[in-house]
Amino acid sequence: MGSPMNRLSIFVDGNNMFYAQQKNGWFFDPRRVLEYFRHEQSETTLINAFWYTGLKDPQDQRGFRDALISLGYTVRTKILKEYYDDSSGRYSQKANLDIEIVVDMFNTVDQYDRVVLFSGDGDFERAIELLRSKNTHITVVSTEGMIARELRNATDRYIDLNDIRDRIEKVDS
């Protein structure tokens, strides 16, 4: 078991990270993410890893979701809903999983000392503040131009995806 302050949980906002990765022009490997954070500090015990994603239909991304599960992620999904955007005059699809992420964070809060949140969504600001008040160390991973200022200010540590690219990038084998 890891030392008392090195119990780690990882939460990946899959849809938010998809757009961040598209913006960066490269994609990270979910397996390498687990390995990187498991070994970043000595005696770290990975307690949980959650991945949240929106689906077009129940079979959408089945292979990817199965691969995540086999790596040890708990996968949470929601069917995408279509919205009309008045400003653009277009329809867009969205599956907001913020509530699911926060519920899992607080349902498992006694199991970890450190959180790594892969998201740039400012909606997490209040949840991060509350977790920090419980002496939880919070790291947020995102990318410039896609991280809300309030989220970056609320966290203990911010990591830009590009700064750890060489450690987590998906490489074709």
Image (spheres, rainbow, N blue to C red):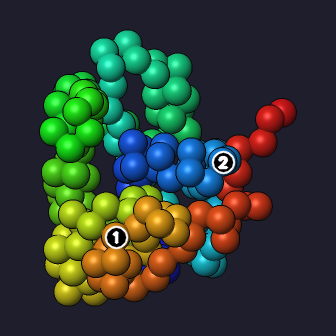
Type of residue at label 1?
Ala
The residue positioned 47% from the left and 66% from the top of the image is: 145
Does the CB distance between marks 2 and 1 fall below 8 Å?
A: no
Secondary structure at numbered mark 2? loop
Q: Quadrant of the C terminus?
A: top right
Dividing the picture into quadrants, the one containing residue 153 is: bottom left
The extreme right residue here reads 173
The correct choice, above or below, for 51 with respect to 159 in the image is above
- Picture coordinates of residue 29 (x, y %)? 64, 45
What's the amino acid at mark 2? Gly
Relative depth, front residue between 74 and 150: 150
The numbered mark, 2 or 1, whose residue comes first in the sequence reads 2
Viewer-nearest residue: 119 or 48 = 119
The label number, if any, that marks residue 148 in the structure image = 1
Q: Position of residue 113 (x, y in %)?
A: 36, 76
Q: Residue visible at 28% across and 78% down?
A: 150
Task: State the image quarter where residue 133 is shown.
Answer: bottom left
Image side of residue 4 versus residue 88, left or right: right
Q: Residue at x 52, y 27 (%)?
A: 64
158 or 20, nearer to the observer: 20
Q: Residues within 10 Å of mark 1 (few under 14, many from 20)?
A: some
| Camera sees residue 113 | no
Circle 1 sits in a helix, a strand or a loop, which is it?
loop
Q: Which residue is mark 2?
A: 25
94 relative position to 22: left or right = left
